[in-house]
């Protein structure tokens, strides 16, 4: 047997494509950004402190500053909603609402008070004319693009984000609550998210069809499958926590945390795993937006914006160990097993090609993908952190070049 000469060649899971992670963009500002929204893979907007409104028309490669009148009303821009390439609404402190009908060249002020301790935090439009503005204890509604605004009482003080699925039915989230309206926003009722006696600050709504998700800064993930009529805790015993939550579709979603920590789910929110992000950034993530399943952006404090064209990658490193060439594909038992959070998986590749390493639950549902890349023949080691999984039995499967191998592992908390 050949003597094994050990060496370590660190191969990032994203080694074969440089854009397989979240890449920093030059936003042109160092102000805190609170919302980012994209119409498509080219046109997007972001807003933040000091009246900052920035726009891109090339997918974020370049951002331009958009002059606007918000600075006269305190300049704290909370939310922006581009209806199309021309019509855009935005809200800020001092009960301020503004609108452009020509892509940001000119703005009109729809609402604002020079002295006010309250603010509009969110805006949502179904089309150019029909929309709602969510503020402190109030919801404004318009059916004519803001020419006239109907005002209604919103039964919670600290309100954060509003969404309507049609002209009659909408929801908004606030501190520890999600409220719903079925009469165009005139009246609202508590949907009773099962928070118990705990404090939960729901700042964003994750929405895909009738599925709605919310999460607090230190809380499990709550989900409704009937547009907030009923709720369930889908990560029991796990304080997933986060500020923005965004779902691309019924299965794929993201949660942003402090310290530039981004986590992703591919099974509707039941399991989450951390993304490869900028290790040099400690900024909190404020907002997330995707134009399709793979192209997305998130905004942060101090003007940071990041983009992915692949949906991001899990933080997992695979290292090649040794120069002895295997004769077949081999998947070793993870060690230690059972394990608490971290374990090592060793495997061997005999044929050059594309390989995946995936985690499954006992029902056969894929819950994480640890490896998805092109590998040369050799022996490999992968360090796996199951931080976001609950205790239980799982299976890991190595697949590639028309072969596969599966083993069982046990996670104990």
Image (tube, grey):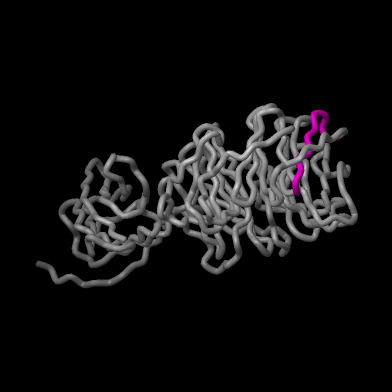
Q: 42 and 312: which one is in front?
A: 312
Q: On the picture, is 7 further left or further right than 201?
A: left
Vertical arrangement, residue 196 with respect to residue 259, above or below: above
Magenta span: 136-146
The residue positioned 27% from the left and 46% from the top of the image is 399
Tell whether 262 sits left or right of 121.
left
Residue sitting farthest toward the left: 1
Query: Among all residues in the image, which is located at the extreme front?
Result: 197
Inspect this view and state whether residue 207 appears: yes
Q: Quadrant of the image for the N terminus? A: bottom left
**Quadrant into which the C terminus falls:** bottom left
Total numbered labels placed on residues in the image: 0
* Residue 220 position within the rendered picture, expressed as x and y whole percent measured from the top left: 47, 52
Looking at the picture, does residue 249 appear above or below residue 411?
above
Q: Relative to 135, is 335 above or below?
A: below
Taking the magenta stretch, the answer to whether it contains residue 327 is: no
Whole-percent x, y for residue 396 in the image: 27, 50
Q: Depth check: give the residue in front, 321 or 324.
A: 321
Which residue is depicted at the point 40% across and 54% down? 237
Task: Give whichever of 158, 398 is nearer the camera.
Answer: 158
> Where residue 87 appears, x then y in whole percent?
78, 36
Q: Position of residue 72 (x, y in %)?
A: 89, 56
Left or right, 378 with reference to 26? left
Identify the image quadrant of residue 246: top right
Q: Is residue 107 visible?
A: no
The residue at 46%/57% (across/down) is: 239
């Amino acid at each position: 047997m050949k003597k094994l000469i050990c060496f370590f060649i660190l191969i990032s899971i994203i080694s074969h494509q440089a854009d397989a992670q979240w890449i920093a963009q030059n936003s042109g500002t160092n102000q805190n950004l609170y919302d980012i929204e994209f119409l498509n893979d080219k046109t997007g907007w972001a807003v933040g402190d000091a009246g900052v409104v920035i726009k891109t028309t090339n997918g974020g490669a370049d951002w331009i500053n958009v002059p606007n009148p918000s600075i006269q009303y305190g300049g704290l821009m909370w939310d922006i909603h581009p209806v199309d390439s021309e019509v855009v609404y935005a809200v800020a402190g001092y009960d301020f609402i503004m609108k452009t009908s020509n892509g940001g060249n000119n703005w009109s002020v729809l609402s604002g008070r020079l002295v006010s301790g309250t603010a509009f935090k969110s805006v949502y439009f179904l089309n150019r004319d029909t929309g709602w503005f969510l503020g402190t204890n109030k919801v404004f509604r318009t059916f004519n693009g803001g020419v006239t605004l109907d005002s209604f009482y919103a039964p919670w003080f600290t309100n954060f984000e509003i969404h309507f699925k049609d002209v009659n039915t909408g929801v908004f989230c606030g501190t520890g609550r999600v409220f719903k309206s079925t009469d165009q926003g005139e009246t609202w009722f508590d949907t009773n998210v099962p928070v118990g006696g705990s404090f939960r600050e729901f700042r964003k709504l994750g929405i895909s069809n009738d599925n709605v998700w919310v999460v607090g800064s230190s809380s499990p993930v709550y989900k409704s499958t009937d547009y907030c009529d009923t709720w369930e805790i889908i990560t029991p015993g796990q304080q997933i926590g986060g500020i923005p939550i965004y779902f691309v579709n019924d299965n794929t979603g993201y949660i942003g945390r402090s310290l530039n920590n981004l986590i992703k789910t591919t099974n509707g929110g039941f399991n989450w795993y951390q993304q490869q992000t900028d290790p040099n950034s400690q900024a909190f993530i404020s907002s997330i937006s995707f134009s399709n399943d793979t192209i997305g952006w998130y905004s942060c404090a101090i003007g940071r914006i990041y983009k992915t064209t692949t949906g991001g990658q899990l933080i997992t490193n695979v290292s090649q160990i040794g120069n002895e060439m295997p004769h077949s594909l081999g998947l070793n038992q993870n060690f230690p097993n059972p394990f608490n959070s971290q374990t090592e998986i060793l495997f061997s590749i005999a044929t050059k090609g594309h390989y995946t390493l995936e985690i499954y639950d006992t029902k056969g549902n894929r819950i994480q993908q640890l490896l998805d890349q092109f590998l040369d023949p050799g022996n490999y080691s992968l360090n796996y952190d199951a931080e976001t999984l609950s205790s239980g039995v799982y299976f890991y499967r190595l697949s590639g070049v028309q072969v596969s191998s599966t083993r069982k592992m046990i996670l104990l908390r």
